[in-house]
Amino acid sequence: MAIKRILVYPEDCLKQVAKPVKVFDDGLNDLVQDLLDTMYDAPGVGLAAPQIGVSLRVAVTDVDWRNEDGIKNHQVWINPEFLWKSDETEITEEGCLSLPEIYGDVERPSAVRLRWYDLEGKKHEQDFEGFQAVALQHEFDHLDGKVFIDYFTPLKRRMITKKLKKKYLS
Ligand SMILES: [Zn+2]
């Protein structure tokens, strides 16, 4: 399919709550292919549809591929929903393709139970922990119009937003 432009925060689509997928058709297949092409090209380990300007609850991840010498093992997440999050948390340094060169520590639950749908519309449920749990929470925040700097202080967030606007959106 195609490599799309990745939106930079605070572009609008990144701040909107995305709509659930209702039809599992060729259009959805094309969107997932675009997400994968764009993620691998970036390169990144996860990408959500709002990051390419599509306000739908779809994301892709491939959390190991950079360490694995090009062996790709992507996963597709449609209408994902956390059924449970652990009280136990962990702090991870996060970055995001939509916030180039910005990194920072974010505290999140260290284990989650997730329900999602695949491209065929089949429902799945599974528990995740560690890096995968953190990566999924980061990606699915995008579906709710949130980015990782939303966990920072308002002052720090304003400074980063100003910097990104000046560098990428002016
Ligand atoms: Zn992100």
Image (cartoon, rainbow, N blue to C red):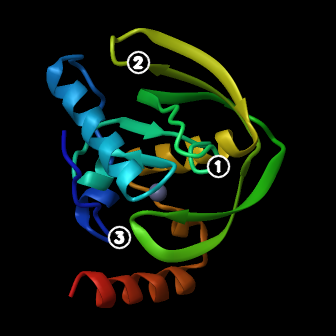
How would you rate the neighbour count of disc 1 (Cα within 10 Å): few for under 14, some for 14-19, many for 20 or more?
Answer: few
In the structure shown, which secondary structural element does the residue marked by tag 2 occupy? loop
For mark 3, what is the residue? 9
**First in residue order: circle 2 vs circle 3:** 3
Residue with the mark numbered 2 = 118
Quick one: label 1 or label 3, which is nearer the N terminus? 3
Q: Which residue is mark 1?
A: 67
Which circle, 2 or 3, is nearer the viewer?
A: 2
Label 2 lies in ligand 1 vicinity (Cβ under 8 Å)? no
x 47%, y 61%: residue:
147
Residue displayed at 57% across by 41% down: 136
Front: mark 1 or 3: 1
Q: In screen coordinates, is 131 left or right of 144?
A: right
The amino acid type found where label 1 is placed reads Asn
What residue is at 70 percent from the left and 30 percent from the top? 128
Question: Based on the displayed image, in which of its 4 quarters is residue 110 positioned?
Answer: top right
Neighbour tally class for label 3: few under 14, some 14-19, many 20 plus, Cα within 10 Å = many
